[in-house]
Image (cartoon, helix red, strand yellow):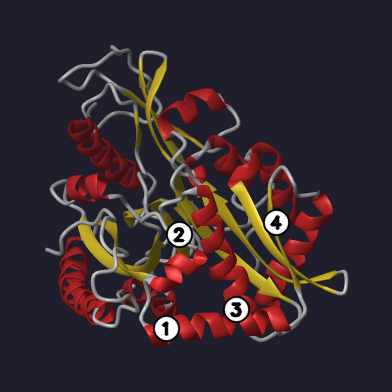
Amino acid sequence: MSANANPADAASGAGGRTDRVPELGCRVIDSLAGVPADDWNRLAGTEQPFLRHEFLAALEQTGCVGEGTGWYPRHLLFYAGERLVAAAPMYLKTHSYGEFVFDWSWAEAYARAGMDYYPKLVAAIPFTPVTGPRLLLDPHLPAGPVRGAAASTAMEIARRVKASSVHWLFTDAAETSALAPAGYILRAGCQFHWRNPGFRDFDDFLDSLRSKKRKQIRRERREAAQSGLEIELLTGADLSDAQCDAYHDLYSSTYDRKWGYPSLTRAFFRTIRQTLGDALVIVLAKNRGRYVAGAHLLQGQRRLFGRNWGRSEYHTCVHFEVCYYAPMEYCIARGLAVFEAGAQGEHKLSRGFLPVATWSAHGIRNPEFRRAVADFTRREQVSIRAYMEEAARHSPFRRGAAADGGIDAVPFR
């Protein structure tokens, strides 16, 4: 695959396991509607629901991305002959909302220099700060060369559409390592994840904590229970459209009280309830027959991913119960190894969530700004690493408790 391949072309090639990269053609499409779900999902696998055709297509079909949203699909498809062998969910962006890798200051610097930072190309899952592959690969292809060629192709496409840059967000360890030698600048971030090394039940988890933290969580769960709210944890098969609508009202209320707008539409939740089934998990709190708080999560093969929360009434500690403790019990019951509760939030540390590095890779076309961004990210990495080390020193776990480690990470550079 040539970095100068015409995105409109589809050259023939060979399939099957090989040590060399076959001649691949690249297409850029503005909708997944024309891509067979089986073809896309063969590359996406089942580890993460966010990468599935059902999830990404639902975003398009229900107006979460597309016209008027600032997220314009420009997915990259790579073919060997007529066979889809690699794909990247990619978007032409006219703002930086919904990415969770914050580059507003970069856009401001571009503006001060009299240049346009937008549009930019972003390989990402909209509104979803979850680490995972951004280039979906046929396992019969040599991953390293294909990743490098795809990275170059994306930069060539950015040049053609006059985008300032290409950003691969929340890349996994293999992609992060491959993008650096392709000329991309690596940027570090930090999240807090909870690990389940095989807890028998929630009390078994509590026994792994220091006494003070154990008492804190028990007190919070007790206060949540004393609120009199009924907590329901429902998966796609158990959810009704009415419950999806009730949750959407709660989710939207968060934005009404703060800022921004609810990116996920009412129709989106109704759609993925049907297409993703039990991968959709919603926790709802009911007060006298009326839903007053809730959170939605998505489940992969080994992980649970917390996404958004909303409420119409305040009740003490119900946020912790709905967003953390009930999902943690769900992970234990289902044997899920990791619970990722979303971006940021060092308040999660005392509740058993430990710091984990996240990574993104940035291709800046302007040489002067590329040097400035590279210098910034180098200094930022020092701060992120120090922050994570300090957070780890405040681990809530008893010495020797098997509750940290085991999560893929790329060493700081």
Task: Name the secondary structure under disc 1.
Answer: helix
Q: Residue at x 40, y 64 (%)?
A: 194
Camera-nearest label, 1 or 2? 1
Q: Nearer the viewer, mark 2 or mark 4?
A: 2
Q: Residue at x 28, y 29 (%)?
A: 5
The residue that mark 2 highlights is 339
Q: Amino acid at mark 2?
A: Phe
Mark 3 lies on residue: 221
Which residue is under mark 1?
Answer: 213
Q: Is residue 60 visible?
A: no
**Which badge, 3 or 4, is on the more N-terminal residue?**
3
Work out how far the residue at label 1 is from the one at label 3, CA to CA, in angstroms: 12 Å
Mark 2 or mark 3, earlier in chain: 3
* Callout 1 crowding tier (Cα within 10 Å): few <14, some 14–19, many ≥20: some
**Quadrant in which the C terminus appears:** bottom left
Q: Quadrant of residue 84?
A: top left
Q: Which label's residue is closer to the chain start, 2 or 4?
A: 4
Give, as a three-letter code, the residue at label 4: Thr
Distance, label 2 to label 4, CA atoms, is 25 Å
Question: What's the amino acid at mark 1?
Answer: Lys
Say whether disc 1 or disc 2 marks the residue closer to the N-terminus: 1
Q: Is residue 72 left or right of residue 193?
A: right
| Amino acid at the residue labelled 3 | Arg
Please tell me how crowded label 4 is: few (under 14), some (14-19), or many (20+) other residues with Cα within 10 Å.
some
Residue pointed to by mark 4: 265
Give the quarter of the figure containing the N terminus. Answer: top left
- Answer whether residue 329 is visible to the viewer in this image: yes
Element type where label 2 sits in the image: strand
